[in-house]
Image (tube, grey):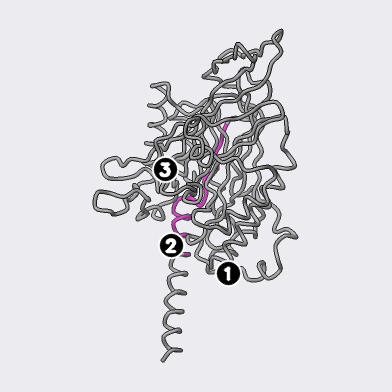
C-alpha cells in the first residue's frame, strides 16, 4: 500500500515536471526563444544630469549625491508570467497578482520612470533583472536614459563547468528539469544610466553550474564603469540574478550548490576586474530570502566586508531615511533584492535613504512580483583646496 502511494506521488511529480518543462519550451518558441538586445556601442557618452558638488567648508571634503534602482521586472515570455502573484497583500489578505500581459507591464514601468524624470525624481542608475522579452529594452528608452547596456545574451556562453563543481553535481543533471537543454534565454540583465557608461563587462556563469529550470537562462553578471561628473574616479556598478530555490524545480540541496557556485564565479570575476580606487555599488535579485545557508555562504566568501543597505538603514535610522516597516531586525533576510557598496580607496559611500518603488497596485494589479529597491547615496572624497573637479558638459 505504501509502495503504491509512493509510486503515485512520484508519477504525479514527474508528470508536473514534464508539463512545466514543455510549457516553458513552448512559451519560449512562441516568443522567438530569446531576444537579442541591441544597444549603442561602448563607450556611451550621453549625459542628462550633472550632480551638484557640495564642499564642507571646514574639512574641504567634496561630495555628490546619486540614486540607484534595482528591480526584477518579471519580463517573462507568455504564458509563464500569467498567474504569478506578488508578495503584496490586498485588504483580504490575499497576494495581489501581477499583470498577465508582461509586454504592456514592462512598457508601463518605462513610462513610470519617464514620469519620475519629468518630476526630477528618476533614479540615476537602473539595474533590471528578468528583462527577457523584447519590451524590456523599451524601459530605458521610455524612461529617458541616454545610456544602457544588456548583460550576457543567449549565445554569450561561459565555460561548461569549473573545478569547483563536483562530478556528482554534473552527473546528476536532469533533462526533465531543463538542465540539459542549453540556454533558451539571455541573462535578463539591463543597466541604464543618466551618466556616461565607459566600460561594460558581460560575464555569464558557467553553463552547467546551475540547477533546474534556471539553467534555461544564461544567468551571469553585468558590470559597468560609469563616469559621474565631478567624481575623481569612475563609479563601478554590478547587477546579477542568482539561481532560485523553489522555482528551480529541484531539491533545495541541489539549488544551494548551484547558488554557491554562482556566488564563487561572481566573486572570482569581480576580483579580476575590480580597481580598488573605484567606489562600487552592487545590487540585484540574489535569491537568498529566508535562506540562512545561502546568506552565510554569501557573507563568509565575500571579497570585502558586506555593506548592505537595509542593514545600514535599519541600524542607523538617523543617518538613512526610510519609511519601510520591516518585520524583523534583519530585513536583509526577508528580501530577494539587495543593494550594497564597497568604498574606493579615496571615496566613501554612504546610503542616505531607501524606499520601495512600484510597490502599489494599479487597478488591483502589480507591475511585477518584486518591488523596486530605490537607494540614494552620498559619495565623498578629500580634495586639496587648490584643486577642483571638472564637470563635463551635458551632451
Q: Identify the residue position indicated by label 2 in the image.
A: 23
Specify the quadrant of the image occupied by residue 296.
bottom right
Image coordinates of residue 28 in percent, x first then y, are: 47, 55
Depth check, front residue: 388 or 362: 388
Q: Identify the residue position indicated by label 1 in the image.
A: 174
The segment highlighted magenta reads 21-39
Quick one: SS at disc 1? loop
Image coordinates of residue 306 in percent, x first then y, are: 62, 43
Cα gap from disc 1 to disc 2, whole angstroms: 17 Å
- Residue in view at x 31 percent, y 42 percent: 361
Q: Is residue 1 left or right of residue 157?
A: left
- Residue in view at x 59 percent, y 42 percent: 151
Vertical relation: 318 (above or below) 204? above
Vertical relation: 317 (above or below) 371? above
Q: Earlier in the sequence, mark 1 or mark 2?
A: 2
Quick one: SS at disc 2? helix
Q: Look at discs 1 and 2 and give the one toward the viewer.
A: 1
Q: Is residue 76 left or right of residue 164?
A: left
Q: Callout 2: 10 Å neighbours few (<14), some, many (20+)?
A: some
The reply to whether callout 1 and callout 3 are in contact (CB within 8 Å) is no
Q: Which quarter of the rendered picture does the C terminus lie within?
A: top right
Vertical relation: 386 (above or below) 362? above
Q: Which mark is residue 355?
A: none
Q: Is residue 383 left or right of residue 97?
A: right
Depth check, front residue: 157 or 328: 328
- Residue in view at x 72 percent, y 60 percent: 164
Cα gap from disc 2 to disc 3, whole angstroms: 27 Å
Q: Is residue 221 magenta?
A: no
Cα gap from disc 1 to disc 3, whole angstroms: 32 Å
Q: Which mark is residue 371?
A: 3
Q: Callout 3: 10 Å neighbours few (<14), some, many (20+)?
A: many
Amino acid at each position: 500500500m505504501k509502495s503504491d502511494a509512493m509510486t503515485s506521488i512520484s508519477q504525479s511529480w514527474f508528470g508536473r515536471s514534464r508539463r512545466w518543462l514543455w510549457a516553458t519550451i513552448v512559451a519560449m518558441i512562441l516568443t522567438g526563444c530569446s531576444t537579442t538586445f541591441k544597444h549603442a556601442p561602448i563607450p556611451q557618452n550621453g549625459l542628462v544630469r550633472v550632480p551638484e558638488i557640495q564642499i564642507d567648508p571646514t574639512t574641504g571634503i567634496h561630495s555628490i549625491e546619486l540614486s540607484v534602482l534595482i528591480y526584477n521586472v518579471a519580463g517573462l515570455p507568455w504564458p509563464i508570467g500569467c498567474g504569478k502573484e506578488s508578495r503584496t497583500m490586498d485588504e483580504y489578505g490575499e497576494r495581489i497578482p501581477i499583470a498577465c500581459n508582461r509586454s504592456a507591464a514592462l512598457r508601463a514601468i518605462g513610462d513610470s520612470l519617464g514620469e519620475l524624470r519629468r518630476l526630477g525624481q528618476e533614479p540615476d542608475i537602473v539595474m533590471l533583472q528578468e528583462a527577457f522579452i523584447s519590451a524590456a529594452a523599451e524601459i530605458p528608452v521610455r524612461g529617458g536614459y541616454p545610456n544602457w547596456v544588456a548583460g550576457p545574451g543567449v549565445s554569450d556562453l561561459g565555460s561548461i563547468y569549473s573545478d569547483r563543481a563536483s562530478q556528482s553535481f554534473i552527473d546528476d543533471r536532469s533533462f526533465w528539469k531543463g538542465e540539459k537543454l542549453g540556454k533558451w534565454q539571455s541573462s535578463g540583465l539591463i543597466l541604464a544610466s543618466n551618466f556616461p557608461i565607459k566600460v561594460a563587462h558581460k560575464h555569464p556563469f558557467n553553463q552547467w553550474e546551475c540547477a533546474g529550470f534556471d539553467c534555461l537562462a544564461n544567468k551571469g553578471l553585468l558590470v559597468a564603469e560609469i563616469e559621474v561628473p565631478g567624481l575623481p574616479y569612475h563609479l563601478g556598478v554590478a547587477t546579477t540574478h542568482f539561481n532560485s530555490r523553489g522555482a528551480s524545480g529541484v531539491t533545495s540541496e541541489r539549488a544551494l550548490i548551484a547558488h554557491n557556485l554562482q556566488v564563487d564565479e561572481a566573486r572570482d570575476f569581480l576580483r579580476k576586474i575590480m580597481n580598488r580606487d573605484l567606489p562600487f555599488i552592487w545590487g540585484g535579485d540574489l535569491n537568498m530570502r529566508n535562506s540562512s545557508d545561502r546568506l552565510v555562504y554569501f557573507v563568509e566568501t565575500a571579497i570585502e566586508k558586506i555593506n548592505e543597505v537595509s542593514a545600514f538603514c535599519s541600524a542607523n535610522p538617523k543617518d538613512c531615511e526610510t519609511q519601510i516597516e520591516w518585520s524583523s531586525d534583519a530585513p536583509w533576510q526577508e528580501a530577494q533584492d539587495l543593494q550594497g557598496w564597497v568604498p574606493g580607496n579615496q571615496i566613501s559611500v554612504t546610503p542616505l535613504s531607501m524606499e520601495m518603488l512600484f510597490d502599489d497596485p494599479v487597478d488591483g494589479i502589480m507591475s511585477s512580483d518584486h518591488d523596486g529597491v530605490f537607494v540614494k547615496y552620498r559619495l565623498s572624497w578629500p580634495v586639496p583646496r587648490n584643486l577642483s573637479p571638472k564637470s563635463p558638459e551635458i551632451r
